[in-house]
Every structure is written in C-alpha cells, then in structure tokens.
Image: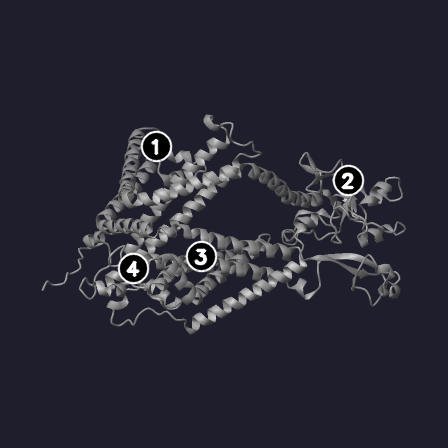
Amino acid sequence: MGGERQHYYGKHGTPQKYDPTFKGPIYHRGCTDVICCVFLLLAIVGYVAVGIIAWTHGDPRKVIYPTDSRGEFCGQKGTKNANKSYLFYFNIVKCASPLVLLEFQCPTPQICVEKCPNRYLTYLKAHGTQEFEYYKQFCVPGFKQNKAVTEVLRDGDCPAVLIPSKPLVQRCFPAIHAHKGVLMVGNETSYEDGHGFRKNITDLVEGAKKANGILEARHLAMRIFEDYTVSWYWIIIGLVIAMVLSLLFIILLRFLAGIMVWVMIVMVILVLGYGIFHCYMEYSRLRGEAGSDISLVDLGFQTDLRVYLHLRQTWMAFMIILSILEVIIILLLIFLRKRILIAIALIKEASRAVGYVMCSMLYPLVTFLLLCLCIAYWASTAIFLSTSNEAVYKIFSDTDCQAVGKTCNPENFSSSSEFHLCPGAHCQFAFYGGESTYHRALLGLQIFNAFMFFWLANFVLALGQVTLAGAFASYYWALKKPDDLPAFPLFSAFGRALRYHTGSLAFGSLLLAIVQIIRVMLEYLDQRLKAAENKFAKFLMTCLKCCFWCLEKFIKFLNRNAYIMIAIYGTNFCTSARNAFFLLMRNIIRVAVLDKVTDFLFLLGKLLIVGSVGILAFFFFTHRIRIVQDTAPPLNYYWVPILTVIVGSYLIAHGFFSVYGMCVDTLFLCFLEDLERNDGSMERPYFMSPTLKRLLNKTNRKPAES
C-alpha cells in the first residue's frame, strides 16, 4: 500500500483510482471554460476602460466642496469665489430629488455667496426699493438690472424668493419653524413666484428639509471621523481579541462539539417542558374566575392582546402547541440520533482538518483584501461617474430664431454669433448633466459598474471557496492522516483553481451577478412606484422581488456545493452542480441535520465572541473600568468605536467560521462520496475517520497474511 500512496489522493487530490468508470480528474479547460475566461477578460478590460474614461471626466472634489452652476468651487483660494464660501440654491425643492445622490448637484441654478440670506424677501417686493441692493447679491453675477421682472425670473438670473437660511456644510438651508401645525418662514406661509402664482411655503420647505437631512448626515460623518482618529488603536486591540477568541472557539469545538450539541438539545426539551408546566398552572389558576371561560371565538379580535391571557382557552391552546412541539422533538431525537452523532463527528473532524491546514484560517484575509480592491474600484468609479455632469445652458428667445434651443456659454454669449443672429436671445441655465454621448450613457455606465462589481466580488468569493474546498478535500482523501497530506495543500488548491477552474468560477459568479443586478433594478423600480396607487403593480413587484430573492439563495447554495465538487474532481461547473445537487438530494435528511447542528454551533460562537468583545468595549469606552479609566479617549459619540468593534468582531468571527463551515461542507460531500463509491475492500477502502466508521459499522478489510 505504501508504494501506491500517491494514487489515493496524490498530487491531483482525487480518490478516483478505485472507480473503473472514471478516468481521473479533468484538469483541462473545456470549451465553456475558455469562453467564460475570455468573456471575463473582455469584461474586465471594458471595466478598466470605463474607469479611465470616468476619471478623465469626473471631479471627486465635488463630493466635498460645493460648486455653483458653472462648476466653479466656492471658497477656494485663487479663484474669483475665494471670498464666497457658501452655496445658495435658487429653488431648494429640486435638491430633494434622489438624483442628487447620484450627481452630487442640484438641478437648479446655484451661486456662491459670502453669507446666507437672513430675511424673508421676494423679488417682486425688493425690486425698485432700497432692499434690492441686498437682494441682488443673491442673483447671478453680471445680470442686467434693466430687465423686466418676468424676464429676470424666467431667465433664472435671480431667485423668486429669499428665505432666512443657516449654513450647513457650506450650503444655505432655510431656517423653518412651525406655528399651530403650519410651516412658516418668518411670518409668511406663501410667496409669489413671479409668474402671477401664489405658492405655499410648505412646498418649498419640505424640499429643504429633505435636502437638509442629506447633508446633516455628512456633518455627522465628520464627527464620527474625529472619533475614529482618537480611538482607532483601541478598536484594533478589540478586533485582535475577537480574532483570538474565534480561533480558540474553533479549537475547542474538537473537544466540546458533542457536549454543546447535546446540552442544546436537552435545554430545548427542558424549556418546552417548563412552558407546558407554566401553561398548566395558569390554566388551573384561572378556574372559577369570572370571564375566564369565554371562548376565543366569542371574544373575537381584540387590539389589547393582554385580554387573551385572562382566558383559560388561551393557555390550553399554548399547552397543546408546546406539547406537540415537545413530542415532535423527542421523536426526531429518537429516530435521528445516529445522524446527529454523524454530524457531531464531522464537526470534530473538521476541527482536526483545520488544525492540519492551519494556514487556511488566514485565507479570509486574502479574500478580504481582494474584496476591498473591488469595492474601492467600484466606489471610486461610481464617484467619478457621478461627478462627470456639467451645467448645460440653452439659448432662449421670445422671437423665432434658428439659434433657439442650442447650447451656449453664458460667459461669452454676448459676443457669439448666435447672439448676433438673435439680438433678443439670452443664454439660460437649462439643466445639469451634459449632451455628449458619454453623458447620455452615464446611467448605463453606472449599471455596468454595479454589475461588474457583483461579478468580480462573487468571483473572489468563489475562488476562496474552491481553494478551501481543495485543501480540505486533500485532508479527507489522505488514507493515512496527516502523512498523505500534500506539503502545501492550500497553495496547491489555489494554483489549481486559477490554472484550471477560472472559467467555471467565472460562469458561476456570472449567474449570481445577473440575479443580483436584477434585484437592484427591481429595488430601484419599487422606489419609483411607491407613490403610485396601482395595487396590481405593487403586488407584481413584491412577487418579483420575492422570487429573485429565493433564486439568489438557491444559486448561492448550488454554487457553493458545485465549487466543492469542482475542487474534488476537476469537472466543469454544470457537471459539478448537477452531481452535487443529486448527491445532496439522495441524502436530504443528513443534509438537514448537519445544517441545523452547524448553524447552532456557529450562532453560539458568534454570540459568545461578539457579546464578550462588545461588553468589554462598552465598559472601556464608557470609562467604567477603573484600572484603565483614564486611558480611554474622549469621544463625541462613545457608540462609534463600540459599534465598530461589535461589527468588526462579527465579521472576524464570520470569517473564521466561514472557513470552518466550508471545511464541514467539504468533508460532508467527501463523506457522502466515500459511502457511495467505496465498500471497505482492498480495492475500495473507506477514507472516513475511525469515529465515522464506528458509527456506521464500517471497516476496511485488511490484507490477508501470507
């Protein structure tokens, strides 16, 4: 047997020597794999091209610093707006549009001003009075004062109304108050828009409130950033503690998995038993009390649910339900006891496998770094695309003219040929966006950016799953553990995944990315249809969202098991997905038991780790630990580092347990394959651990002594 050791799992990592119908692992790229590889490569090249184009057109400074309608920054030294630090919007209602988050610019004329308006004033009241000197500082620089009032307001040279405002993040937002439930600005509830219409001030301030809420979040973010600058090293210490606890918990599972599972089962039975006892005591206590014998049907529906607790029939119903659950759990425990023992044995075996392939615990860092790279590229490209828009000015005129509707430049319009063709024409702000092919394709480029992010992120996750599955499969199919393990199982599996299975990973991640981008588009459409009263459309949208959510969950489940089969046998994605699916369906009860047992252990571990680190962080950052009371930094919001530590601890625990979960799933599929392909003979020995052999009454027959 020693001379044939390499054939059991060997350098390729497959047990297929013992299957005469199988010719060995398929380590070559099929036609589908090649097509998917080429398609992924072309998509990445296109994605890089989109990023380069976006970076040449966009300006991320617009995210931080306000700009006027002409794209000039407010308050920047060396510019004509150096002394004008605040941005004033002519019509703040338009800033409440969700498109502001995509374009970082309100679709309304806006100028840089030295200070925000401090009084309520309309253009109609100010025109021709001494207050006009104050009013005109909020008009477009260089506007002609000899224009008629209607022309000024129509051309967008001046706002129709000034509202007392306060600066927030270098933007002017109306200061609003309510009097007897009516929104007011000063003593006014309405204003003239300059076209003979009286508009309610509520329409104006509601938009201001929404826009104000968007930018208040930015102010909050600055204070949160300050907290991070003084507490980041303590946060790192908390995350290191979470990492150590996660590693210790996985090591302890080798010894305590069985105890924890059986304690959990006993606790569930005892809790249900106490619930039955409590319901019986309440049922007995209410005997003879007035009104306790009224039936639930006679009582009907009551908004105060406490009324039902005074009825004997309620406690009888609770007692029956709990008794049924108790009987079901006990029967499942009796009939599934052996399968629970197998699940516990696989969990213990997974802990041993992780111990032999310890470098696998560090692989989530590789996945994390690659995901950070994907997120950074997607976010930066999205920001550059969003800040690529520019103000568009059109020629308007009261007379018929060929130049009307053409794009113009307000700075040199008076000396342009269009102005000479139409002497009465004017160059007016039309919209914020652009008219080039690039600007018309911005929405499509944003969708492509999101789609490529989903595809690449799913590819990175798939690469990690195949790599870990290949490493842990090499442990299972080693007949003599750990002597038959490859020298570097994780690096060998990573190399095989990149060399032979890139196309399969690209295809699987493409399927998932298509479903995810459809879900994003459905969410967008749902937001647009919220104001609609069409109940059928809402019902259809809800059904579609539910269906695609279920489809995404199913594809994730199928992909995960397909990647394990790819790592074991080297077959393509479709073949691996089909084989994995039918293998699991033939062992559906074992799958369900193992899934619930591992879910419980992982939930217990995450609660233990996150709870312990979170409580420690709470006492530390709130200065409640006397020994280090003076060490904790002063903070604006003490919950910022606490939540960061809690979320970070959860992600770390999830990263460790994802490796462990992948190990359990890989060993489980290998175990099922082992049962179906081998019989314990010399030609087909079992590769499972001695504990699993003992549970299943399986043995490997020894060679006869000569």
N-terminal of the pair, mark 1 or mark 2, is 2
First along the sequence among labels 3 and 4: 3
Q: Is 56 on the left or on the right of 663, as rendered?
A: right
Which image quadrant is residue 550 in? Answer: bottom left
Q: How packed is label 3: few (under 14 Cα within 10 Å), some, or many (20 or more)?
A: some
The image position of residue 239, as x and y in percent, is 45, 41
Q: CA distance from mark 2 to mark 4?
A: 73 Å
Give the distance between the C-alpha atoms of the residues marked 4 and 1, in whole angstroms: 59 Å
Q: Measure the C-alpha gap from mark 2 to mark 3.
A: 53 Å
Q: Which residue is mark 3?
A: 461
Of labels 2 and 3, the one closer to you:
3
In the rendered image, residue 143, in percent from the top left (x then y), is placed at 85, 51
Asked if residue 630 shows in the view, the reply is yes
Query: Label 4: which residue?
Result: 670
Of the numbered discs 2 and 3, the one sitting upstream in the chain is 2
Q: CA distance from mark 1 to mark 2?
A: 68 Å
Viewer-side label of 2, 4: 4
Give the residue pinned by disc 2.
117
Q: Is label 1 or label 2 in front? A: 2
Q: Which residue is mark 1?
A: 292
- In the image, residue 294 above or below residue 161: above
Residue that protrudes farthest toward the left in the picture: 706
Mark 2 vs 4, N-terminal side: 2
Query: Which amino acid does the dot numbered 4 rest on?
Result: Cys
- Residue type of the residue flagged with mark 3: Leu
Element under disc 1 = loop
Q: Secondary structure at mark 2?
A: loop
Residue 14, given in percent of the width and then of the height, sits at 30, 64
